[in-house]
Amino acid sequence: MSSTQLGRVQLLIMQVLWAKRRATARQITDAINEIEPIAHSTVQTLLRGLEEKGSVSHETEGRTFVFLPLVVEDEFKQNATRDLLDRVFSGNVGKLVTHLLKNENVPKEEIDEIRKFINRRSKK
């Protein structure tokens, strides 16, 4: 489960499920359509694939499937970050942070927050 890789739209589906904790395919479709257009049939197909991967399950309420995430969001983020760090930056956190600060438009507030975190970690 922890090594589950998700495509971009699969991740959108999981983000909806993490936020709502449980949702029908229609509710998921509607939530994603607020961000970008997606066909309901596409969401249904991707949900079946996510079930096969063991990332979601469903309960039946009447004739409706209600989907639930089986992957914990924080665990997914931790594993995805570790995978990126290992594959792209050879496990070097400093290279990842440097790359982000050089190539992304990081607002001053976020830099200040990062600096505070680094200072707290340095004192430990």
Image (cartoon, rainbow, N blue to C red):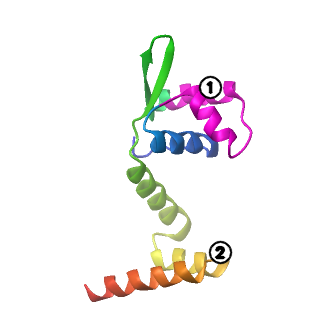
Around disc 2, counting alpha carbons within 10 Å, would you say few (fewer than 14), some (14 to 19), or many (20 or more)?
A: few
- Distance of label 1 from label 2 (alpha carbons): 34 Å
Badge 1 vs badge 2, beta-carbon distance below 8 Å: no
Q: At which x and y percent is residue 51?
A: 48, 28
Instruction: Identify residue type, mark 2.
Output: Glu
Most extreme residue toward the right is 37
- Between 86 and 102, the residue placed more toward the observer is 102
Secondary structure that dominates the magenta span: helix
The residue that mark 1 highlights is: 45
Farthest left residue? 124
Residue 1, by quadrant, is: top left
| Residue 27, percent from left and from top | 57, 31
| 81 with respect to 40 (left or right) | left
Instruction: Please name the amino acid that badge 1 sits on.
Output: Thr
Secondary element at image label 2: loop
Answer left or right for 40 relative to 87. Answer: right
The picture places residue 32, in percent across and down from the top left corner, at 64, 40
Residue positioned 61% across, 39% down in the render: 31
- Start-end of magenta stretch: 23-50
Name of the residue lying farthest toward the top: 63
Q: Residue at x 59, y 80 (%)?
A: 101
Horizontally, residue 123 falls left or right of residue 24, namely left
Residue at which label 2 appears: 104
Q: Residue at coordinates 68% horizontally, 29% vertically from top-left?
A: 42
Asked whether 46 falls inside the magenta stretch, the response is yes
Choose the circle earlier in sequence order: 1 or 2.
1
Dot 1 crowding, Cα within 10 Å, few <14, some 14–19, many 20+: few
